[in-house]
Image: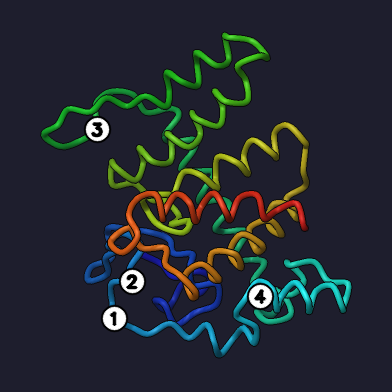
Amino acid sequence: MKCFPSIQTVCNSKLSCWREYIRSVAGLQSWGGAIGDGTASQLKDIYDLHTLTDILERCDKRGQAFWEYVEEREGKEIWPFLQEIWQTMQDAIARGLEAEGVLSGSLGVPRKAWAFYRKTINAGEHHKRPGLLSAYALAVSEENAAGGQVVTAPTCGSCGVLPSVLRYIQENFHCQEDTILRALATAGLIGNLIKQNASISGAQVGCQGEVGAACAMAPAQPRN
């Protein structure tokens, strides 16, 4: 597991609702959005505002976008790390769309992302949006289930939502990478607010809480 955005430390970081889940790193685990090394988060040392109302008021007064507030609090070093996070998301989608067969384990669950993707490509424009969004999200989720490298966004259980939305937006609106990175910064800010004021942990609020948090992070992007 890697913490977001600091690769070297776990949870003692900026935008810490993001963590790259790497199973080869011994001693670090993720339990339904919980942070497994027991280190306390230090978000309050980075962000001076802790509610969306306060952040909206600040941004409106200064004419800032959410991503500009993130940059102000995090520093410009946030962008290279977000670039790495975005690349990791894209790689997970690519691997998941190519992989066929059955997921490891005794249940014998077949991979479906590749089939969704190919059927969508051949089905025409009417089915394009729901088909591609489903295929991309399944691809990342299946990579998670297979023990692959994914970005918790904000948890492993909801790791497919945000990469799917961003990939679809980039492909269909021809966004520059800077726009995607700003969207990631905005989404991370929303995820942090949920984590701090409620919970992103499936162990606490169930799977619907994890996916609900991811669904709140994704549409936050238009304010970029």
Answer left or right for 81 relative to 148. right
Q: Give the mark nearest the N terminus, 3 or 4.
A: 4
Amino acid marked by disc 4 = Glu
Compared with 48, 30 (above or below) is above
Which residue is the site of mark 3? 103
Amino acid marked by disc 1 = Gly
Q: Give the mark nearest the N terminus, 2 or 4.
A: 2
Label 1 to label 4, Cα distance in Å? 26 Å
Between disc 2 and disc 3, the foreground one is 2
Between disc 3 and disc 4, the foreground one is 3
Q: Quadrant of the N terminus?
A: bottom left
Mark 4: which secondary structure? loop
Answer left or right for 197 relative to 190. left
x and y, in percent, of residue 90 in the image: 54, 43
Q: Quadrant of the C terminus?
A: bottom right
Q: Residue at x 56, y 27 (%)?
A: 132
Q: Residues within 10 Å of mark 1 (few under 14, many from 20)?
A: few
Question: Marks 2 and 1: CB-CB under 8 Å?
Answer: yes
Q: Give the mark nearest the N terminus, 1 or 4.
A: 1
Which sits in the foreground, 204 or 124?
A: 204
Instruction: Say which mark, if any, is on residue 35.
Output: 2
Label 2 to label 3, Cα distance in Å? 26 Å
Label 2 to label 4, Cα distance in Å? 23 Å
Mark 3: which secondary structure? loop
Q: Residues within 10 Å of mark 3 (few under 14, many from 20)?
A: some
Question: Marks 3 and 4: CB-CB under 8 Å?
Answer: no
Which residue is the site of mark 4? 77
Which residue is the site of mark 1? 38
Between disc 1 and disc 4, the foreground one is 1
